[in-house]
Amino acid sequence: MTFANVVALTALVVALGGGAYAAVGNPFVSARGTIQGCVKRAVLDVVKAGKHCPKGTTSLAFSRTGPQGKTGATGAQGAAGTSAAYFAYGGNSNVLLSSPVATSVAVLSKSGLPAGTYAITAKVNLTAVDAHPGSTSQVNCQLVDVPASGATVGDSDWWTASTGALIGGSFEDQTTLPLAFDLTTTKTSTVALQCNDLENNNATAAFTVTASDAEISAVKVGALS
């Protein structure tokens, strides 16, 4: 075939397989995706699917889909290990923090964290209530993991309350403390959220500090960088 015939053949393939490539019922394309060409004296004719070339011509069948290319390189693999998430919610029940007390009061915990590396976050709502305005308190909350061996790890946050807003006949102050830390453990672990009211300037029984709506989230990750 001459160069002109090759160009004509290429144009024909584009015409048959380009604009009508996805068309259903193309009369020149068989169900197997082949096109039947017939060549005579360097001239190419295409017959409808299922038809044979007439005598005196040379059959030239081709596919509208080219051969499959080589397999590409394997992409980079992700971090090893299975991701998992663990969550605990304490509900809106109020946990009373004795006032004042040096020992922390357990607010919420999440046990059963398998060995691994975790990104851990938590939050807790605190409310200070007194019958008198201007009462103050200093509260400390800790999010900690106490391993079977080794040092305790965690995060702590402070709040200085001042009862100034009159709500339902009592003076209140409210806040939300966020806490977070990273943990790598080789054994099953428990993460605990605890708070304590370190001091306040009103020792009457009317003064209370409570913790509520506590949450702990622990997301297992492949590695920390």
Image (cartoon, rainbow, N blue to C red):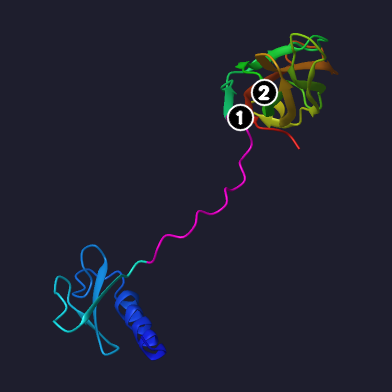
> Which residue is at the far front?
56
Q: In this image, 33 relative to 146: left or right?
A: left
Count of numbered marks: 2
Residue 55 percent across, percent down from the top left: 14, 82
Whether 199 is drawn above or below 8: the answer is above
* Camera-side mark, 1 or 2: 1
Question: Residue 126: percent from the left, percent from the top?
Answer: 70, 25
Locate residue 68 relative to residue 173 in the image: left or right.
Answer: left
Left/right placement of residue 122 relative to residue 3 reads: right
Q: Is residue 90 visible?
A: yes
Residue at the spot of label 1: 81
Query: Which quadrant holds the N terminus?
Result: bottom left
Q: Earlier in the sequence, mark 1 or mark 2?
A: 1
Above or below — where is 111 with respect to 74?
Answer: above
Q: Position of residue 72 (x, y in %)?
A: 54, 54
| Closer to us: 27 or 63 | 63
Q: Looking at the rendering, which quadrant does residue 44 occupy?
A: bottom left
Name the residue: 58% across, 25% down: 87
Residue identifier under label 2: 116
Residue ID at (66%, 19%): 115
Amino acid of disc 1: Gly
Residue in the foreground of this view, choosing between 217 and 4: 4
Looking at the rendering, in which quadrant would you find the C terminus?
Answer: top right
Determine the secondary structure under disc 2.
strand
Does the segment drawn in magenta span residue 79?
A: yes
Q: Which residues are magenta?
A: 66-83
Residues under numbered marks 1 and 2 in contact, where contact means CB atoms less than 8 Å apart:
yes
Does the magenta segment cover residue 161?
no
Residue 129 seen in render: no
